[in-house]
Amino acid sequence: MQKPFVFLMNIFRKYPLEMTICAIIVITTAGVYYPVRWHEFVYYDDQLYIINNPHIQNGLTWDAICWAFTTTRGGSWHPLTWISHMIDISWYGMDAGGHHWTNVQIHLISALLLFLFLRCATQRIYVSAAITVCFALHPLHVESVVWVAERKDVLSVCLAHLTLLLYVWYIEAPDIKRKIWVWLCFCLSLMSKPMMITLPVLLLVLDFWPLKRFHSRSFYQLIKEKEFMLLLALVVAGLTLLSQDREGYIILDVPFHYRLLNASISYCVYIWKMFVPANLTIFYPHPGTDISVFQGLLAWIVLILFSLWMTHFRDRLPYVFTGTIWYLLTLIPVIGIVKLGDQQLAERYTYFPMTGMVIVLFFSIAAGYNQAVLKYFSNNNNRLWYHQTGILFVGMLTLCLSIISWHQIKIWKNDTTLFSNALELTPNSCKAKLGRGVAYQKQQQIPEAIACYKETIRRCPLMLNAHINLGNILAQHKHEYRKALNHYKFALNELPDDPVVINNIGNIEMLCNHPQNALEWYIRALNADDSYIHTFYNLARLINHMHTQSRLF
């Protein structure tokens, strides 16, 4: 049996250019993202997934694994993502840099899998390398990689890329064993994030190009081949909608036709940001009914006309057809037709879909370059010129994207940098104002934090986290218990079973020397969520206090 070092050297000898490209992509991407080792957790969603999640805080245990497979916390069923967070806790504890670095490592593996898939499917080295560099280093993808709560993004896409690669391996020699590997990997991708429900249809599009299977098989045969994956995708889509609705993530405050207009605008904005990745931020507030009808209709007209054009020329320009469908199709779950949350769009949503438009871009450039330049050279010069320009183009692309992403990564260092950037670009965002208040509170700048929370409540009275955070500050730092209680009870009216709010009311009763009232609130908090560990601490402290008082008398 070959030693690993000898095995790797043999691979380098057989595929030196491919292995060199892989090494450069890994080293460059790891270098650009290395500063995340000193990044902190951020307030938005990291609290939900890591910091205030007792099931994650215990690390990888059997009870935690059972919880991961039965919960829809966060609005989705993604047990593999939860388990990955548990492993991080077991390995790194609460060292945020370690959690960030896991995201980067998964992202690196994902980039390599994408390159291998494109190389095997298209046989084009430099175009595949350019597409992979865009995936690995584009500033639009920074959000997915450096945000710990977006582990589901990097993990699901990594497994989706592995599914694509295994699918190419399967069609080389179709048999049930290879098909099962494709199915298994697809299932794991869905268990990381349900957004991958569009993958079976994408495989069908890839059968047209670059895999060119429509020449040897009928459309019915190709559909039947994927019937298990399609059925599974439908089931997961239905369950996800139910869980999102139950958790309150589906918002119907915007009429359907306005959501359609916003969807068309978002499709176009994402493409614009692909070419001009400037003014990127964590929040893009939804305009609601203030959206421009003219812009929305114009965007739909452009999308429809382009779709008709690329369908008509699909045989002449198959890469345009496949890339466009890749982009349009995989964005459907998050484009906003079913409104999930109060954002208009989000950069993290482009993590997988953008590859489609990058395929269109770089294969079009390569085709134009071949027609305009290479036909004037002899075969030997042609080959040399092809390699030289390919290396130069990929190198320049890598350098440019690395510089822009390096600066974008800095924005995500902590709450202060992140929400300052968000307020600068979206000054009317209540979430940005709330996040800035949290940053002030962490820095013990209490007056500034109070001002931020009050301004958030003035603009968005139903921003419950602002009420809770303001109540915490008023109780802990100002000792204004009655005002704090008012904010907690306002939040309780909207969230009657929230253990954090109920526990905090118990704390107020304790501070006001009403132990019996505090006991009732703590018991109610445990009934709401018996895994909220702070209630156990407070209850133990209360019982100890009551025991001490009874001994005094």
Image (cartoon, rainbow, N blue to C red):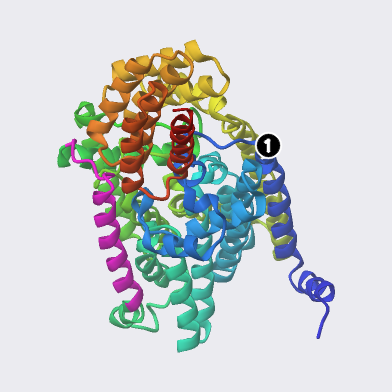
411 relative to 259, above or below:
above
Q: Quadrant of residue 464?
A: top left
The kind of residue tagged 1 is: Trp
Image quadrant containing the N terminus: bottom right
Q: Nearer the viewer, residue 116 or 481?
A: 481
Residue 74: percent from left, percent from top? 37, 48
Determine crowd level at label 1: few under 14, some 14-19, many 20+ residues with C-alpha closer than 10 A: some
- Residue drawn at the location 46% of the way across and 75% of the way down: 184
Residue 371 in sight = no
Q: Residue furthest bottom?
A: 175
Residue 280: percent from left, percent from top? 48, 31
Q: Is residue 439 left or right of residue 129?
A: left
Residue 234: percent from left, percent from top? 28, 67
Q: Is residue 17 left or right of residue 36?
A: right
> Which region is colored magenta?
228-254
Instruction: Based on the picture, tell me whether residue 533 belongs to the magenta stretch.
Output: no
Q: Is residue 381 left or right of residue 185?
A: right
Residue 460 in sight = yes
Can you identify the residue that label 1 sits on? Answer: 38
- Residue drawn at the location 49% of the way across and 87% of the way down: 177
Instruction: Based on the picture, tell me whether residue 233 belongs to the magenta stretch.
Output: yes
Q: Quadrant of residue 399?
A: top right
Image quadrant containing the C terminus: top left
